[in-house]
């Protein structure tokens, strides 16, 4: 038997269904989390680019930490030690994302430092100005690349963050190992959630609905996404319970 045949394959359709069933069977707490999440996003919207974004972000982090401890019934749901421990994998995820995004942004400028002629550099600079400053094409391309790499730099490491929150190992290496062979499954998950968010944004934009209502529409989708991640954690980590 090959190594690939021993990998646990994430059943995306089943995970999505079980997550929807979970939300349907826990309407009251799920609704509470959805409402609180909406108000937290609203606070983030109005505190963006101000010093108040930091305390809002901190409370938001604690909120989702509480959510996952509640989901896995890890009492007390609000406990400082696992929240602090979870900051190790979350910081690594943040650094991974920041480094990768920086590389993507800087990479188009690399030809300017490769010793080409001044004429080539002038033409290339005009090209960059046209397609990076005056067009959304490059932004779209960067977003596509980020989605393609998101299974490695976000979705699979996210399970390590959940693990640390509930008092277990927050090792990113362990998360990558346990989810090995599931790139396409996590990519499909990323595409589905990105499609959901974009679809809601486009619909709200077409109807010219104010931004707070957009956040209200996105909030249950975000809660559902986190339930899906919790179910995914159960699938890959249930053997350590």
Image: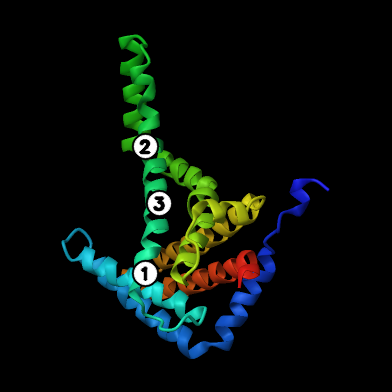
Mark 2 nearby-residue class (10 Å; few <14, some 14–19, many ≥20): some
In the drawing, what numbered circle is on residue 92?
3
| Res. 16 image quadrant | bottom right
| Res. 238 image quadrant | bottom right
- Tell whether 159 sits left or right of 4: left
Residue positioned 71% across, 54% down in the render: 7
Real-space Cα separation, disc 3 to disc 2, in angstroms: 20 Å
Which SS class for mark 3? helix
Residue positioned 69% across, 70% down in the render: 14
In the drawing, what numbered circle is on residue 83?
1
**Percent x, y of residue 217:** 43, 74
- Tell whether 153 sits left or right of 59: right
- Above or below residue 60? Residue 120 is above
User: In the rendered image, is residue 204 in sight?
Assistant: yes
**For marks 3 and 2 on the same chain, the one whose residue lies earlier in the sequence:** 3
- Viewer-proximal residue, 217 or 152? 152
Real-space Cα separation, disc 3 to disc 1, in angstroms: 15 Å
State the quadrant of the C terminus: bottom right
Furthest residue toward top = 117
**For marks 1 and 2 on the same chain, the one whose residue lies earlier in the sequence:** 1
Which SS class for mark 2? helix
Furthest residue toward left = 51
**For marks 3 and 1 on the same chain, the one whose residue lies earlier in the sequence:** 1
**Percent x, y of residue 200:** 46, 66
**Percent x, y of residue 72:** 52, 78
Labels 3 and 2 touching (C-beta < 8 A): no
In the drawing, what numbered circle is on residue 105?
2
Real-space Cα separation, disc 1 to disc 2, in angstroms: 32 Å
Camera-near label (1 vs 2) is 1
Which SS class for mark 1? helix
Mark 1 nearby-residue class (10 Å; few <14, some 14–19, many ≥20): many
């Amino acid at each position: 038997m090959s190594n690939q045949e021993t990998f646990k394959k994430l059943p995306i359709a089943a995970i999505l269904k079980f997550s929807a069933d979970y939300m349907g069977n826990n309407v009251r707490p799920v609704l509470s989390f959805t409402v609180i999440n909406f108000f937290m996003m609203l606070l983030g919207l109005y505190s963006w680019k101000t010093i108040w974004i930091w305390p809002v972000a901190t409370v938001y982090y604690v909120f989702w930490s509480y959510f996952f401890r509640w989901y896995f019934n890890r009492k007390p749901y609000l406990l400082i030690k696992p929240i602090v421990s979870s900051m190790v994998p979350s910081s690594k995820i943040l650094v991974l994302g920041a480094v990768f995004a920086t590389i993507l942004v800087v990479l188009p400028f690399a030809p300017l430092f490769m010793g080409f002629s001044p004429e080539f550099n002038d033409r290339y600079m005009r090209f960059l100005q046209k397609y990076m400053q005056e067009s959304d094409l490059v932004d779209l391309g960067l977003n596509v690349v980020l989605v393609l790499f998101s299974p490695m730099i976000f979705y699979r490491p996210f399970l390590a963050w959940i693990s640390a929150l509930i008092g277990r190992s927050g090792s990113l290496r362990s998360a990558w190992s346990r989810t090995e062979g599931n790139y396409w499954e996590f990519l499909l998950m990323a595409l589905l959630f990105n499609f959901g968010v974009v679809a809601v944004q486009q619909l709200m934009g077409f109807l010219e609905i104010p931004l707070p209502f957009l956040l209200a529409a996105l909030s249950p989708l975000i809660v559902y996404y986190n339930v899906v991640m919790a179910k995914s954690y159960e699938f890959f980590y249930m053997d350590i319970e």
